Amino acid sequence: MRLGLKPNKNEKMLFCFFMMPDGSLVGTKESLEFDGATLNAKGVAFTKVEDEKVWNLTFDGELPMHRKGEDSSVKVKFDLRFEGANPMFNYRDCVTADKEALAASVASEHLEQMGKVLGQLVVGDREYYVKGLGERDHSWGERDWTAPRAWVWLTCQFNEGCGFNVTKLYMDKGEIDAGFLYMDGENLPLVKVDMVTEYDADGSPNTLFMAMYDKDGVVYGVKGEVKKKTIMEFKGENDRGSIMFETLARYRMDDGEDVGYGIAEYLFRK
């Protein structure tokens, strides 16, 4: 789920998707008229309970559903609670001033936090109890989805005490790597990420291999495999556009037995 406030463009951006067990995709991506600096759009609401720690996410209404090549709508209700597991991580802790300036047109300020998610989801006549892990992203400043040639944004949680976040920005004038590895109760800033990705015929990511370097030079190897995906397009100024592959991925780190899950988001400028 994502809410974007763009008062300078009189616009709110919403996307909210559920990749269901039966293979159907339930959700929407919309640009709406800006109606104030509130964290709600078309009934999807984010409510802060505790600063930098706890949020409630709620909705009760209809959402589009795509299943086996057919489009319809379905009644959806959810009441979810996100509780942070690690301290908020600021990308300024791993990006130099020149890299920060290079990324300013995408998100000049960027915070990340992993956490646990509890609650209920009802889709049609099916009710699900949700108990899992996830990621909270808060970025602000100038936001031009078509400014980078590409970006990769990854999240992974192995358990409440271990997970990572990676961002790779491919700008016309250079690349920016950022993120953290949370383990042993500490956020370890990541300063470099080498990545190789294998793609399917439609251009979507299939498998990725990474070497993540922390500030002390320690290297962590990661393999990710995409399990589910959806595709979104964005229009920018001067007829520029971009395409985003939003995927659910399964990860392993350093050939360990522990399996983690999270998002593997790939965006390419068209």
Image (cartoon, rainbow, N blue to C red):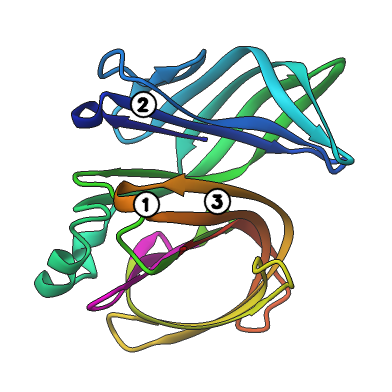
Amino acid carrying mark 3 in the image = Glu
Magenta portion: prevailing SS class? strand
Q: Earlier in the sequence, mark 1 or mark 2?
A: 2
Foreground residue among 177 and 222: 177
| Residue position for label 3 | 160
Q: Secondary structure at mark 1?
A: helix
Residue drawn at x 18%, y 58% is 104
The quadrant holding residue 141 is top left
Depth-wise, is mark 2 or mark 3 nearer the camera?
A: 2
Residue 77 horizontal/vertical position (percent): 67, 15
Q: Going by the image, does 236 lie left or right of 108?
A: right
User: Can residue 257 be seen at all in this image of the molecule?
Assistant: yes
Q: Secondary structure at mark 2?
A: strand
Q: Secondary structure at mark 3?
A: loop
Q: Going by the image, does 48 lie left or right of 159?
A: left
Q: Is residue 254 magenta?
A: no
Residue drawn at x 55%, y 51% is 160
Q: Check the image and report above or below for 29 versus 213.
A: above
Q: Earlier in the sequence, mark 2 or mark 3?
A: 2
| Residue position for label 2 | 12
Amino acid carrying mark 2 in the image = Lys
Question: Which stretch appears magenta?
Answer: 164-187
| Residue position for label 1 | 239
